């Protein structure tokens, strides 16, 4: 039976606690798959995979060090030779019929593609963000993947604009763990007369737009709207203690109105419980979010979402469950939050829509079904050239 190797990035530990969205996608999608191996820079065992199903690649950590020291100063011929040397061990494992599934590293795919195909294996490039757009044309055009997978249609369309001859591709979203994220009472949220809470979860960095939420909460305070905001996060996913506060975090503390409070990031069951204690979820991003995994987790928790109209977020809310506002508009954000805070019936209905849409589109079972379909099609012999139909996008291009 051919093996599928999932190659993580040099910065992605295979960890439920310390890993990011890529680690989460891989763990939840391939957990029950046969003949699948995760290639990672580190593994703390928190995902519960058998030891033989996770192989550590020392070259990934080395590549991270080279990048931190030299960055884009590494010219492409040198980077190509470097990547082929650092990834020599996993490449040597490939056999005819195997698949190397490269996550979010176009330069990996471009550098090692000849070696993958020389081994008789297939190459899949899975883009979780706009990383493809960051590399020069001569590198991007060197990618000859057998298939490209995008996390959202936004990313797919973005790539197709740059690469009209991209080749066969698919979109498969992320899911949420229903053992952690679920509504407090069955399929709908039960509201009380207490002051409603709006929740933000994520990194406290400028592009996430927490400063816009702070400005909106200040406006709501002046309007006399009964609403409180809770911000869960730090500079990264480690909790962000006050001792590690960045200039941006200190500025947020300075401008925060009394109806907004900050708490360190949490994960697992504690995070799921925090979702269930909230009434509205807010994603005030000021950049083009590739997906916004927290949106899916909020929908799984039966939370109505107020989010910026950016990147792939409109796709997630296409089936209902949220209110979209312009990026960077504190006044629109305040209006949307006020509407949901003051209208319990509307809040209940939008929450119901969110949960129904999640069940239909974003469970890990749905994602696994898409993954298996991609692999099945990839393994079928091609008898004619593949024509890729470009789907028109109704959302803005990346800035």
Image (cartoon, helix red, strand yellow):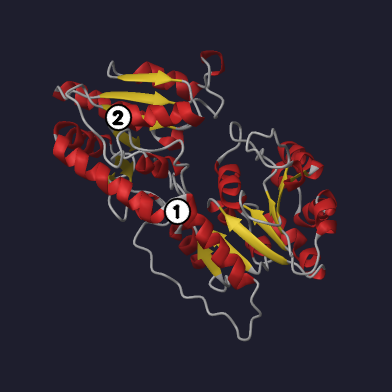
**Quadrant hosting residue 81:** bottom right
Q: Which residue is mark 2?
A: 198
Secondary structure beneath dot 1 equals: loop
- Residue at 68% from the left image edge and 68% from the top image edge: 144
Pinpoint residue 129: horizontal percent, then vertical percent: 53, 50
Pinpoint residue 259: horizontal percent, then vertical percent: 27, 19
Label 2 Cα crowd, 10 Å radius (few <14 / some 14-19 / many 20+): many
Pinpoint residue 382: horizontal percent, then vertical percent: 64, 81
* Residue 248 vs residue 380, the one in the foreground: 380
Q: Does the residue at mark 2 contact the one at mark 1 (Cβ under 8 Å)?
A: no
- Residue at 31% from the left image edge and 50% from the top image edge: 356
Position of 174 compared to 359: left or right? right
- Residue 316 seen in render: no
* Figure quadrant of the N terminus: bottom right
* Residue 377 vs residue 335, the one in the foreground: 377
Q: Which residue is mark 1?
A: 398
* Residue 75 vs residue 352, the one in the foreground: 352
């Amino acid at each position: 039976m051919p093996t599928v190797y999932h190659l993580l990035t040099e910065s992605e530990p295979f960890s439920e606690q310390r890993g990011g969205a890529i680690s989460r996608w891989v763990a939840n999608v391939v957990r029950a798959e046969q003949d699948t191996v995760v290639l990672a820079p580190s593994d703390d065992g928190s995902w519960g995979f058998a030891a033989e199903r996770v192989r550590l690649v020392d070259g990934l950590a080395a590549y991270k060090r080279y990048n931190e020291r030299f960055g884009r100063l590494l010219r492409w011929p040198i980077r190509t030779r470097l990547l082929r040397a650092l990834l020599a061990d996993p490449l040597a494992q490939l056999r005819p019929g195997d698949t190397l599934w490269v996550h979010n590293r176009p330069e990996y795919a471009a550098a090692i593609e000849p070696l993958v195909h020389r081994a008789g294996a297939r190459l899949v490039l899975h883009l979780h963000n706009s990383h493809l757009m960051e590399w020069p044309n001569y590198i991007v055009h060197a990618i000859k993947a057998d298939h490209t997978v995008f996390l959202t249609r936004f990313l797919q369309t973005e790539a197709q604009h740059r690469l009209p001859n991209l080749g066969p591709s698919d979109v498969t979203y992320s899911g949420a763990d229903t053992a952690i994220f679920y509504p407090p009472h069955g399929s709908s949220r039960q509201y009380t007369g207490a002051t409603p809470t709006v929740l933000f979860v994520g990194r406290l960095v400028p592009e996430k737009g927490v400063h816009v939420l702070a400005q909106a909460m200040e406006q709501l305070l002046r309007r006399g709207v009964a609403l409180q905001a809770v911000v869960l996060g730090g500079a990264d996913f480690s909790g962000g203690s006050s001792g590690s506060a960045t200039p941006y975090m200190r500025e947020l503390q300075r401008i925060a109105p009394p109806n907004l409070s900050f708490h360190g990031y949490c994960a697992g069951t504690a995070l799921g419980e925090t979702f269930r204690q909230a009434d509205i979820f807010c994603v005030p991003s000021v950049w083009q979010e590739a997906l916004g995994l927290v949106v899916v987790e909020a929908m799984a928790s039966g939370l109505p979402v107020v989010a910026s109209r950016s990147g792939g977020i409109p796709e997630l809310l296409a089936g209902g469950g949220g209110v979209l506002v312009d990026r960077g508009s504190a006044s629109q954000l305040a209006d949307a939050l006020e509407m949901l805070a003051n209208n319990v019936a509307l809040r209940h209905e939008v929450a119901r829509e969110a949960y129904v849409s999640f069940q239909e589109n974003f469970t890990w079972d749905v994602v696994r079904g898409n993954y298996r379909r991609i692999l099945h099609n990839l393994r079928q012999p091609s008898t004619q050239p593949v024509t890729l139909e470009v789907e028109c996008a109704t959302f803005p291009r990346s800035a």
